[in-house]
Image (tube, grey):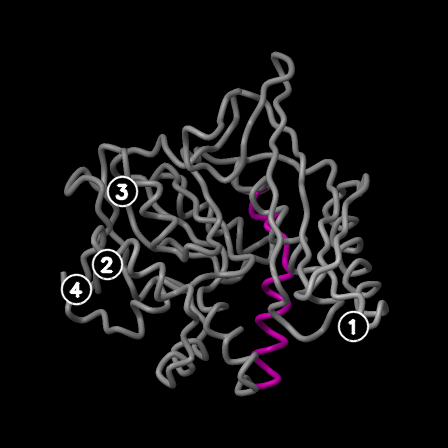
């Protein structure tokens, strides 16, 4: 066992040979959009993301389904599974089975197996002072999904956020293999700050984020100002705010977005400072238009995240 329960990494890793290790992960959740086909795609993209964050390649998957068969037409399940299968095909992974149960609440996701060379695993630790942080997708999907559930989201942002959540982190993972990446994670339910705190806790370093450099949906700020902030975002804040220092210029709405519980978010990559500009350039060339350098690793204070505005020093 190379990575297991002793570390808060995105997946477990078990070595098979000198050149092959298995990456194993599982993830499923309730619908975040109304369209069952798109929900299937999003759930699969989200489950596969852990493998990509570890630097690996997904090879097989098994469906996990909870379905209210007495209250919902089976055509809904058919569309969910079709969306999931299409996304797996796009990823080049094979569906090898699954399991379903009857439940009052619909849920869908995957158990995923990937492979990686044992010497090329990307864990959440291993970064060094001066390393740059690169984020590949914009923040705010938790807030937007809350607006969708409340019937307050525009059709334009529903379409934009849905397609972004369904976008695989495959191309971002492919690009980062060419550069000196020291650590990586994906931004999902714990929000950007929650996942970043996991990275710095137990390390000898801290991180500075520059708020204006962090990509986010403009609509997320609008909806957050209306109070459309999910419970998970408040829980993330309660759990991790003691480890985060905000400039006074970083308002509460911006803070909510940084704590926002994401669905199928982007990769957060710690890369050698000399490679960061080229990494972002290559990400843009591969269609990751929102990718940006958002901060850097610092020597002190240790085990803390500082959120700053550049104009405030």
Of badges 1 and 4, nearer the viewer stands 1
Of badges 1 and 3, nearer the viewer stands 1
Rendered residue at 74%/62% (across/down) = 67
Mark 4 to mark 2 CA distance (whole Å): 6 Å
N-term-proximal mark, 1 vs 3: 1
Q: Is residue 268 above or below residue 222?
A: above
Which is more toward the observer, 123 or 243? 243
N-term-proximal mark, 4 vs 3: 4
Mark 3 to mark 2 CA distance (whole Å): 12 Å
Rendered residue at 18%/39% (across/down) = 302
The quarter of the displayed image where residue 184 is located: top left
Q: Is residue 42 above or below residue 276?
A: below
Q: Locate residue 286, reporting x and y percent.
A: 60, 53
Q: Locate residue 141, reporting x and y percent.
A: 50, 68
- Residue farthest to the top, as pictured: 18
Q: Which residue is mark 1?
A: 72
Mark 1 to mark 4 CA distance (whole Å): 48 Å
Mark 1 to mark 3 CA distance (whole Å): 49 Å
Q: Which residue is mark 2?
A: 307
Proximity of marks 4 and 2: CB atoms separated by less than 8 Å:
yes
N-term-proximal mark, 1 vs 4: 1
Q: Which residue is mark 3?
A: 297
Task: For the C terminus, give its image quadrant.
Answer: bottom left
Q: Which residue is mark 4?
A: 247
Which is more toward the observer, 273 or 129? 129
Query: How would you rate the neighbour count of disc 3 (Cα within 10 Å): few for under 14, some for 14-19, many for 20 or more?
Result: many
């Amino acid at each position: 066992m190379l990575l297991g329960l002793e570390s808060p990494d995105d997946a477990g890793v078990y070595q098979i040979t000198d050149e092959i290790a298995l990456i194993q992960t599982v993830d499923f959740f309730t619908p975040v959009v109304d369209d069952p086909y798109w929900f299937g795609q999003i759930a699969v993209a989200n489950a596969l993301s852990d493998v990509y964050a570890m630097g690996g390649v997904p090879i097989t998957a098994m469906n996990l389904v909870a379905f209210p068969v007495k209250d919902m037409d089976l055509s809904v399940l058919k569309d969910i599974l079709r969306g999931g299968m299409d996304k797996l095909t796009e990823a080049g992974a094979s569906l090898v089975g699954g399991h379903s149960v009857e439940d009052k609440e619909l849920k869908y996701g995957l158990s995923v197996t990937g492979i990686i060379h044992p010497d090329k695993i990307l864990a959440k630790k291993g970064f060094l002072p001066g390393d740059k942080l690169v984020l590949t997708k914009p923040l705010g999907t938790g807030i937007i999904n809350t607006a969708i559930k409340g019937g307050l989201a525009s059709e334009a942002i529903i379409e934009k956020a849905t397609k972004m959540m369904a976008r695989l982190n495959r191309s971002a993972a492919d690009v980062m293999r060419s550069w000196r990446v020291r650590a990586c994670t994906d931004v999902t339910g714990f929000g950007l700050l929650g996942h970043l705190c996991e990275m710095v806790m137990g390390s000898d370093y801290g991180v500075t984020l520059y708020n204006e450099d962090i990509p986010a949906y403009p609509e997320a700020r609008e909806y957050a100002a209306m109070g459309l902030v999910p419970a998970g975002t408040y829980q993330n804040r309660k759990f991790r705010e003691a480890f985060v220092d905000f400039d006074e210029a970083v308002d509460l709405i911006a803070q909510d977005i940084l704590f926002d519980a994401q669905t199928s978010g982007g990769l957060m990559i710690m890369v050698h400072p000399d490679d960061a500009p080229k990494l972002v350039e290559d990400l843009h060339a591969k269609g990751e238009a929102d990718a940006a350098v958002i901060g850097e690793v610092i020597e002190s204070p240790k085990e803390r995240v500082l959120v700053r505005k550049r104009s405030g020093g």
